[in-house]
Image (cartoon, rainbow, N blue to C red):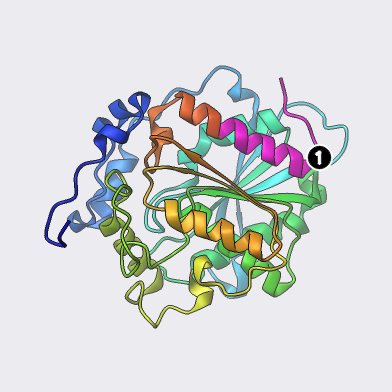
Amino acid sequence: MSSTDKPQSTHHLVAPELKAALEDYPSLDFELGVNVIRDGFSERETPPLPEGLEQVSLVERTIPGHGGAPDIRLLIYTPPGDAKGKRPAICHIHGGGYVIGTPEINDISNRSTALSLGCVIVSVDYRKAPETQWPDSRDDCYAGLCWMRDNADTLGIDPDRIAVSGESAGGGHAAALAIHARKMGGPKICLQALDAPMLDDRTGSTSDPHPYVGEFVWTPASNHFGWKSLLGVEPGGPEVTEEMAPARTQDLSGLPPVFITVGALDLFLEEDLDYIRRLARAGVSAEIYVIPGAYHGFGAAGATPQMMTATQLRNAALARAFGTELAG
């Protein structure tokens, strides 16, 4: 196929259960302006809270940013009942291509995870690009992680059983957070639970394009916009240092165990596979599951077999890291 030929659509490769959701997905054409995209997501109707999840308590609080940075908003989810001991915990970072999103978009999943694992979840409302550029958003996430460790007794959590998790850009931030915590001698992280993490600025910019990924939801053009907004320089270029993107980090040794799920049609498929390969070669416990027929953000399709599988695998990995059993 020549460089001028339009690639064949991959719609026939989408799992049947996931096709209908594609028609309802908000536009991610950033040529319309980032605020238009943000408004489109904020105006989406919030699905009703499934029965039973209301028993998970939600508290919003604000903590100081590091080094005089602005205050940071946190959402804290705590499962019901009295714990027999200190609970495990998750520092959660929401997705949105580094440019959109709030912790509320994961309200249902965070409540469900807290209930299933009996853990406390602290979701960080970090600053977004392009208004704020690297490394400020990562530092917001690090401030949230450090606050969890420093306030472990008040939260009722075990500081040795804190995982980091995130979806898409949130997964990228979580991976960067683990690398930064290693550098700083920061809080201990027992697992990185990453859903289609956004790790490599070269994807969609300078890397060899994969012919069967990135057609839906998050495209190479979206990825270029997200990374350029975050970094403030051209993605894929020589100005991007290894500290600015997890996939560019040369030394991956000594990082916490990593668990990844990613769709087979997701733009991030190859960068996630390569990250796992390199982690394994560095002696890090590394686990990845590729979900057939799934595109980026396929969780929007609801309780499909694909989403149920991904959630079960993720929760099982977290339970192993916590040394606990899943509820029910």
Find out whether residue 322 is within the magenta segment: yes
List the residue tagged with mark 1. Answer: 323
Q: Of the residues shown, which amino acid type is indicated by label 1?
A: Gly
Q: Residue at x 33, y 48 (%)?
A: 213
Q: Is residue 138 above or below residue 83?
A: below
| 16, above or below 167, in the image | above
Please, which residue is most extreme toward the top here?
51
Considering the whole magenta stretch, tell me its main secondary structure.
helix
Quick check: 209 left or right of 119?
left
In this rendering, the answer to whether 321 lies above or below 173 is above
Quadrant where the N terminus sits is: bottom left
- The residue closer to the viewer here, 317 or 28, is 317
Q: Is any atom of residue 111 visible in this view?
A: yes
Foreground residue among 89 and 198:
198
> Residue 228 appears at what percent x and percent y?
33, 69
What x and y, as percent, mark residue 43? 30, 37
Q: Is residue 272 magenta?
A: no
- Residue at left offset 65%, top offset 59%: 280
Residue at the location (38% across, 68% down)?
A: 202
Magenta range is 311-328
Position in image of residue 258 (x %, y %): 64, 52
